[in-house]
Amino acid sequence: MKTHFYKLMKKIKSANLALLGILLTISSCKSEYKLQLESPKQLQVSEKLSVSVTEKNNQPIDSTWYYLDGQKLAAASAIDISDKKLGKHAVSATIFYGEEQKKLTNTIVFLAAKAPQIYTYEIVNEYPHDENAFTQGLEYYDGFLYESTGQRGSSSLRKVALETGKVLQKIDLEDKYFGEGMTIFNNKIYMLTWQGNKGFVFNLDTFKLEKEFPYGQSKEGWGLTHNNEQLIKTDGTDRVWFLDPETLEEKSHIEVYTIDRNTDKLNEIEYINGKIYANIWQRNSIVIIDPITGTIEGIADLSGLQSKVGKSGDDHVLNGIAYDEEKDRLFVTGKDWNTLFEIKLLKKQ
C-alpha cells in the first residue's frame, strides 16, 4: 500500500510538472514579441516621411519613441524632410512594452526633390595648354593659372601664364606620389595626393613646402577647392568633405544625389557663386552641386571638347575647372589636352 501511494504521488508530481511546462510554454509564446520598424528605403525630400512599428503576434505596445539621426521626432507621420541633407540617414524607434524596451534602426536614403537642369556650352576663347600635363587641379588666381598634375614620376605643381600656356614656376613631387587636386587659400597652396593619404601645404610665392597633413575618413585625395571659410575635398566617392583650413580636420560632409541615385567618382572641383562644380572621373561633364544638401542642380555635357583636342578614351577626359570671379570667366581643360577653353554654360531648353 505504501509503495502504491508513493507511485501514485510520483505520477501526480510528473503530471503537474508536465502541466507546468505546458503553461510556461504558452506563457512564453504569449510574451514573445516580434517587432518590426516600417520605413521607406528611399524618399525624395519633397515628400513626407512616415514611420511605424508593427508587432506580428498582436502583442500590446505601451509606447514608441521615434528618432531621425538621433533626434526625437514629435510625430511618426507626415514628417517634413525638405531641409535635410541628401543621402543615408538613420531612422530608429525605441519600443516600450511591459517592463522591457527594444530599439530598432533602419537606413533610409533621401533623394533630390527634382531633376537637374541640363546645360550645353559655347566656347568663348581657347588658350594653349601643356599636352603633357595630366591635369588634376586647376585654379585661377591673381591673373595666373595654378595647376597640379598627376601620374607617379611626373606629378607637379605649376604656375602658368593664361594667354600663352607657359609654365612660369614649377616643383615636382617625389616619384612615389600621384598628385591630385589643389586650391589657394590665405596665401597658401593646398595640394592632395591620390592614395598617399597625405596632402601638402606650400608657400604661394616660393612653392616651398610648409607642412604635410594626413586624411581622415576620406581615404583618398581627388579634388580640392574652398568657400572662403573651409577647404572642400572630394575622395572619389559620392561624398564631399569640408575641412578646417588650419587643422585640416574633416568637420563634415555631404552626399551627392539626384532624384533617383547617388553620383560617385567626384573629381576636380571649383566653388563658383555658392555652388560646387565638379568633374566626374571618366566622364566629360560637370555637375553643379548644392553645398548644403548635396543636390545635383545642374549637369553640363562638355563631351564635344575631348574630340576637339584630338583625344579619346577614359584616360584623357575633361578634368580641370577654374573660375575668374572678377571677370566671370569659366575655364576648363583635360588630362593631357593641348587646349584650355574659356566657356559659357547655356541652359538647355
Image: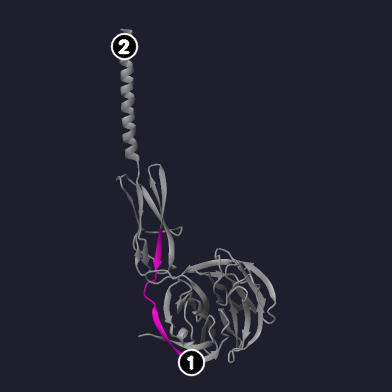
Q: Main secondary structure of the magenta part?
A: strand
Q: Nearer the viewer, mark 1 or mark 2?
A: 1
Q: Amino acid at mark 1?
A: Val
Q: Residue at x 52, y 76 (%)?
A: 268
Label 2 crowd (10 A; few <14 / some 14-19 / many >=20):
few
Label 1: state its secondary structure: strand
Label 1 crowd (10 A; few <14 / some 14-19 / many >=20):
few
Say which residue label 2 marks.
5
Q: Residue at x 59, y 78 (%)?
A: 149
Relative to 23, residue 231 above or below = below
Report the side of 230 relative to 296 (left or right).
right
The number of numbered discs placed on residues in the rendered structure image is 2
Image-quadrant location for residue 106: bottom left
Q: Amino acid at mark 2?
A: Phe
Q: Which residues are magenta?
A: 107-124
Say which residue label 1 marks.
124
Report the side of 196 relative to 288 (left or right).
right
Q: Earlier in the sequence, mark 1 or mark 2?
A: 2
Q: Are marks 1 and 2 in contact (CB under 8 Å)?
A: no
Q: Nearer the viewer, residue 314 or 223?
A: 314
Q: Nearer the viewer, residue 48 or 150?
A: 150
Relative to 59, residue 281 above or below = below
The question of residue 66 being in magenta is answered with: no
> Where does the image place residue 343, in percent across and percent down from the top left?
48, 88
Image-quadrant location for residue 187: bottom right
